[in-house]
Structure formats: C-alpha cells, structure tokens
Image (spheres, grey):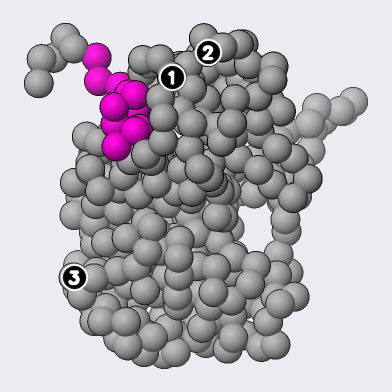
Amino acid sequence: MNPGLKTYLWTTGSALAATGGIAHGEWRADGVSIDSRTTKPGDLFVAIRGPSFDGHDFAADAIAAGAAAAVVKRRPDAVSGDAPLLEVKDTTRALKDLGQAARRRTGARIIAVTGSVGKTGTKEAIRFVLEEQGPIAASQGNLNNHWGVPLSLSRMAADSTFGVFEIGMNHPGEIAPLSRMVRPDVAVITNVEAVHGAHFESVDDIAEAKAEIFQGMTGDGVAVLNRDNAQFNRLAAAAGEAGVNNVIAFGAHEEAQFRLMDVRTDCEGSDVTARIDGAEFQYRLGVPGHHWVMNSLAVLAAVGAAGGEIGPAAVELAGMIGLKGRGRRHTVEVAGGAFIVIDESYNASPV
C-alpha cells in the first residue's frame, strides 16, 4: 500500500458491497454515525428508526454537519436531490451489514466483554493498555446493544491489530446474536450478580444469558472467567458446551491462572502482586478500589489470550484514571481546605 495514500473506512463501493442498495453519488467516509447531533465531517450517517424517532428526519442535519453520505430507506423531503445517499431496504439491517463486513475484512484479534458489573471499565482498560501494542478498535462508552455493537464494529479499520467490544443485555437471547456478529477470539465475563435483573427469575438465569457470549466463538476461542464468582462452574460448563474449551480464570482463588496474591490500596490506586501462569507480577494500578484490582486481572488475562504482551500491559495500568461516572475522583476546594468527590453516579450497581 502506498504510505502516502489515504485509506478510508468506507467508500461507495465497499458500502455497496456490504449492504446492497442503490448509490447516489461517489463518496468516502472516515467514520459512521447514527446520531445527527454528534455527526462529524466525513461520517457516514445511517438513518435508523427507533420506537420514538426516525433518523430520516435528521438526515438533512447530518449532511449539513458534513456527513460524507447518508444511508436511507427513502430520500427524505429535506434532503436535496444531489445529496450523496445509499438507499437500502432496511437501514438497521444495513448497519448490521456494515458491522459484519468490517469484522470479515480485518485480521484483528477480537475481545468481547460482558458481565453484570464492570463491563465498560474492563473494556476501557483493555483498550487503554493495548493502544501501545497496535491499532485498536473499541466500543465508545457503553455502546453495547443491538445498535451499539454493529455501530462499533462498522467503525473498525481493516488494519486494526486488536478490537475490544462491550456486549450488554436486558433480556435472555440478546447476547447470542451480538456475539455471532462480533465473533470474538476472547470472551470476558467479569462476573454474574443479582443486578439489573428485572427480566430474570434468578442469578442462574442471568448466568445462562451471559454465557450466550460463547455462541459466536470458535473452538480456538478463549473464555476469561472470574474464578471467585459463584457462577464460575456454570459459565465454564456453558463454554465447553459451545465448543470453547480454553478457559482462563482470574481472581484470588487458588485455581486461578491470573491469581491475586497481595494488594495494597491507597486513595490514588493499588499496588498489586499477582501470580500469572506461575510467574510473579507486581504492578501499579492507577485507579483505587478492590473491584478495579479484580478487573485488572481480567484485563491482563484478556491481553494475553489475544496475543498481546502482558508485561507492558501491566505497566500501562499505572496510567489508568477513573471513568466519568464510574469512580472518577474530583477534588473540590472549599474555604479552609478541600474534599474529594468520588463519582459513581452512572447506573450504579448494589454490588
């Protein structure tokens, strides 16, 4: 490839090949968006329809914001006749098609993350430590549903070395199709707990639903599971039933391959000693809290399973900071001193 030649995420031809339909105009896109309010110049805007909105109503806004083109079922009245468009039968299906095409064209090692708590933090930590080891694609925020997962995949560059994607659920049966779309090489289940379980009768049922993540994997895949969690055996058995026989356990349990041996925590973070496949690792974690210590073990296990280097990843963990709404600390100056606010406001869990 000519190093001076710009490579675009999507062109008219590649998007047509992925989705079918009819193209109006030639265009090249650097990104993908489904929200006209955050569309950036060069994005491909996909006009999806939801229960209370229709993206076609905002296609003109997206084009005015600089979108390279819009994926639509019909030309909206407010869109000019010469606007660059890709007309398809179903825009939500087209978004999935783009995501699946992006997955097919990359040789990246893909990590998928789910769990009752800790999904976004673990995903972000994996992204953070792997950025120094090669180009990485990752879900933004918690884009983990039937729109967010294909959107995140569609943004993955073909030359990515790694990809890390969050998969969430509200009901049974939601994770399996998303896993088949992502086709992860490594699946991380942070834990299974009795949280956000309005549509489940028991924690066992939640575990069965989380285990759907194995259904998109091949026999060469690796499951990364919390050995300290009461659902470990159920999850490991489900992995085996799906043909995923390589299970890596993390936790304080003596059988964990990524085992916590000692931790010293202060208000800025933790000094962690872990035994990883028989070797002792000591590293600094830049965010405080025991839950982050356990997350860090899952992160290093996922990095190793994806072919990354564990040692450099452990060093990078010192640079982690708390995520917005998920443990970020704020120092507030007041008369006579200061106090620290710990922001755990985002969708807080009781565990």
Q: Residues within 10 Å of mark 1 (few under 14, many from 20)?
A: some
Three-letter code, disc 3: Asp
| Image quadrant assignment for residue 282 | bottom left
Using the numbered discs, state the Cα–Cα distance from disc 3 to disc 2 in whole angstroms: 46 Å
- Residue at image coords 55%, 68%: 174
Q: Which residue is mark 3?
A: 220
Q: Position of 116 compared to 23: left or right?
A: right
Q: Position of residue 38 (x, y in %)?
A: 62, 25
Q: Earlier in the sequence, mark 2 or mark 1?
A: 1
- Residue at image coords 59%, 76%: 172
Q: Residues within 10 Å of mark 2 (few under 14, many from 20)?
A: some
- Residue at image coords 24%, 56%: 306
Q: Earlier in the sequence, mark 1 or mark 3?
A: 1
Q: Position of 25 compared to 51: left or right?
A: left
Q: Which residues are magenta?
A: 6-17
Q: Position of 25 compared to 13: left or right?
A: right
| Image quadrant assignment for residue 134 | top left
Q: Is residue 13 magenta?
A: yes
The reply to whether dot 2 and dot 1 touch (C-beta < 8 Å) is: yes
- Residue at image coords 25%, 48%: 104
The reply to whether dot 1 and dot 3 touch (C-beta < 8 Å) is: no
Q: Which residue is mark 1?
A: 24
Three-letter code, disc 1: His
